[in-house]
Image (cartoon, rainbow, N blue to C red):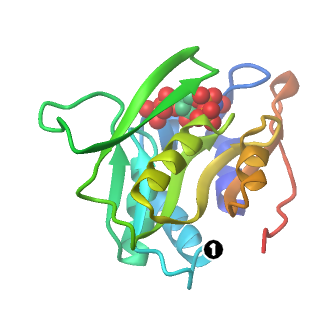
Amino acid sequence: MELLKQKIIDEGKVLSDSVLKVDAFLNHQIDPVFMQEIGKEFAGRFANTGITKILTIESSGIAPATMTGLELGVPVIFARKRKSLTLTDHLYSAEVYSYTKKESNEISVSKDFIKSDDVVLIMDDFLANGQAALGLIGILKQAGARIAGVGIVIEKGFQNGSSLLKEQGIKVESLAIIDSLINGQVTFKEEVPSR
Ligand code: G4P
C-alpha cells in the first residue's frame, strides 16, 4: 500500500536495526483519516471471504481493526492482556511470549463473543515473530471458529512471523513489508499478492 509506505518514510523513525517507531500515526497518535484508508484496503483484500468478526489484541491493533470492521460491517473484538474486573471466567485464553519484551502475557477473550459458526479475520498493527497472532489463532481454535486470515499493517519481513503463519496454511495480508532497517534506512519488500 503506497500511502502507508510513504507515511512510514515521512513519519517513521528507525530506532535500531530491528525496531521501527510509528508513534505518529499508529502506536500512540492515530491518524483517523489515514486509518480509514487502511480499513478500506483490508476490506478489499478480504472481500468475499464471509468474515463475520474481526479479532485483534489491545492496544494498537484496535484502530485498524475497527476501521476494517466499519468497512466490512462486522463486530470487532480485542483480546485483553490484563484480567479486567468484569472479565472473570467464561474465557478463552492463550499465553503469548514476546521475544522483543522478553515477557509472557496471558491474553483472553470472553466466550460470549466468538462462536463455532464465526469466520474470523485476525488483525494486528505489527507482525514480528508472530506470537500474538499465534495466540489469537489458539483462541479461535478453542472456540471452533474458522480463520479467514491474518491482516497486518506493518510486517517485519526479516523476522519469522509470516512464515510461521503461512506454514499453517493461513492467508497473511500485510499492507507494508519491511525488508530491512539496517543503517537507519527503511527498505520495503515488493508486494506479491498471496492469492
Ligand atoms: P510478535 O507478536 O509478532 O511475536 O511480536 P513481538 O513480541 O516481537 O512484539 C511485541 C510488541 O512490540 C507488540 O506490541 C508488537 O506490535 C510490537 N512491535 C514489534 N516490533 C515492533 C516495531 O518494530 N515497532 C513497533 N512500533 N512495535 C513493534 P504490544 O506490546 O502488543 O503493544 P501495543 O499493541 O499495546 O502497542
Label 1 amino acid? Arg
Q: How many marks?
A: 1
Q: Is residue 31 visible?
A: no
Q: Residue at x 13, y 30 (%)?
A: 85
Q: Is residue 169 visible?
A: yes
Badge 1 crowding class, 10 Å Cα cut-off, few under 14, some 14 to 19, many 20 or more, is some
Quadrant of the image for the C terminus? bottom right
| Residue 127 spot, x, y in % from top left | 65, 42
In the rendered view, does 125 fall on the left or right side of 84?
A: right
Local secondary structure at mark 1: helix
Quarter of the image that includes the N terminus: bottom right
Q: Nearer the viewer, residue 6 or 117?
A: 117
Q: Position of residue 60 (x, y in %)?
A: 44, 41
Front residue of this view, candidates 90 and 159 = 90
Pointer 1 residue: 45
Kindly give the residue lying farthest to the bottom in the view shown.
Answer: 48
Residue drawn at x 12%, y 37% as measured from the top left = 86
Q: Quadrant of residue 129?
A: top right
Q: In the image, is residue 127 above or below residue 72? A: above
Residue 151, position in %: x, y? 59, 58
Residue at image coords 65%, 55%: 4
**Residue 78 appears left or right of 179:** left
- Residue 8, compared with residue 113, is above or below; it is above
Q: At 65% across and 39% down in the image, what residue appears?
A: 130
Is the CB–ligand 1 distance for label 1 below 8 Å? no
In the current view of this chain or complex, which residue is farthest to the top? Answer: 102
x, y (%) of residue 125? 54, 45
Q: Tell whether 63 sits left or right of 22.
A: left
Question: Where is ligand 1, by quadrant?
Answer: top right
